[in-house]
Amino acid sequence: MKILVTGGTGFLGRRLVMALLDRGHQVYMMGRNFSRVQELMHDGAIPVACDLRDHEAVSAACTGMNTVYHAAALVKPWGNWTDFFEINVDGTAAVLEGCRKHSVRRCIYVSTSSVTFGGQHQFNVAETSPYPQRFSSPYPLSKYYAEKLVNAATDVQTVILRPHTIFGPGDRWLPRLLELARQQRLYQIGNGRNRSDVTYVDNVVHALLQALYAQNTSGKTYIITNDEHVVLWSTLRVVLQRLKLPETLRTMPLPFALMLAAAMERRANWTGTTPMWTRYTATMLACTQTFDISAARRDLAYEPVVSVSEGIDRTLDSLKLHRRWTIY
C-alpha cells in the first residue's frame, strides 16, 4: 500500500514508519524536522515536509494514498489553546478533507484515553464511557473535538485508537520525571496506591498495524494499553532504584497539589512560561486509570507484545546508550 503517516518524525510515528517499511509498504512520512529520521529515509521512507496548519499542503499529501495514519498532534500538558486548536482540531479536519478529496480508503486516527478523563479515579474504562463535562488541559479538550470530527466523517472509513500513557525509547514524559527526581523536586502525588495502564510504544504500533487490515471496524474506537494495571508509583520507584536515584519521595496530597498547580498555571499565564506542574499532570499522577481493552482484542486481534517490565528494560537501555541519562 501507499501509506501516509502524519507525525512520522515523532516518537510514535517513527516506530510506525519503521514497522510499515518492514512489511513492504510505500511509506510517506509527514513532518517538519527530518534530522532524526535519516535512517528511515535511507530505508525508503519518503519525507513530506508539511505543517498541519497548511491545509492545502496537507490535502496534497493525501494524493494517491490507500491509507492515512493521522498521528501528528501537539502533545503537552500546557500551552496556548489557539495552538492546540489549530494543530489538533483544524489539522485533523484538513487530513479528513484530504482523504475525502483524494478518495483515501481508510484514515486511522491516534487519539488519547485522556478524552474520557475528568480528574477522578477511573476503573476499567471502556470506549463507551462518556466524555467529561470539563477538561483540565487544552490537550485532551482538543483531542475530544478532533474525535468528534473523525466520528462525523461518514464518507471516509475511520478508526480511532486511544492509547494510554505511551512510553519507550525516545519518549518525553519519563525523562522529565527522572530529571525532577534527580533535582529532588519529584513529589508523590496522592497516596501512591493508584494504578495505571501504561502502554509500551511497540504495543501501540502493533495495534495500529492490526487496524490497517481489520474488517468491520469503520467508525469504531478502540482503547489500547498493556492491560497490566500497574501501581504507578511503585513502578516509578523501581525505575528510580535502577538509576540509583532517590526513591524515597516526599508526599503531596492531591488537593494541595491542585492548589499549587493552579497557582503555577496563573503565573504561567502572566509570564508566558511553562509551569512545572499543572492540574492535569497532578491528577494523571494521582488517580487510578485502568481500562478495558476487550474490544481491541475482539475486533483487532490485539494482544500486547511487550510487557511493562520488558518495556522498562528497553527504555532504560536506550537512555544509557544515547547518554540521555547519567547514573548517579
Image (cartoon, rainbow, N blue to C red):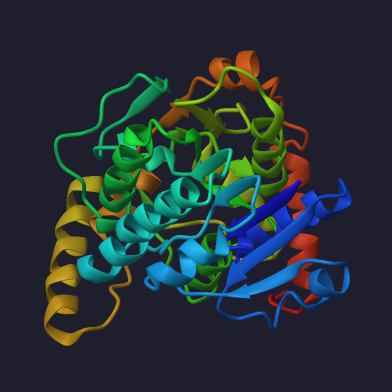
Q: Camera-side residue: 50 or 77?
A: 50
Q: Residue at x 39, y 63 (%)?
A: 76
Name the spot of residue 189 as percent of width and height, x first: 35, 50
Q: Is 14 placed left or right of 268 in the picture? A: right
Q: Camera-side residue: 256 or 32?
A: 32
Name the spot of residue 48 as percent of width and height, x first: 62, 72
Vertical placement of residue 249 versus 163, above or below: below
Vertical placement of residue 161 versus 173, above or below: above
Q: Residue at x 55, y 73 (%)?
A: 182
Name the spot of residue 248 as percent of width and height, x first: 51, 56
Res. 240 in view: no
Q: Camera-side residue: 191 or 213?
A: 213
Res. 136 in view: yes
Vertical placement of residue 150 versus 213, above or below: below
Q: Residue at x 53, y 73 (%)?
A: 179
Q: Quadrant of the C terminus?
A: bottom right
Vertical placement of residue 181 versus 231, above or below: below
Q: Is 85 placed left or right of 31 in the picture? A: left
Name the spot of residue 192 as percent of width and height, x first: 42, 40
Q: Is 323 placed left or right of 266 in the picture? A: right
The total of numbered circles placed on residues is 0
Q: Residue at x 63, y 13 (%)?
A: 298
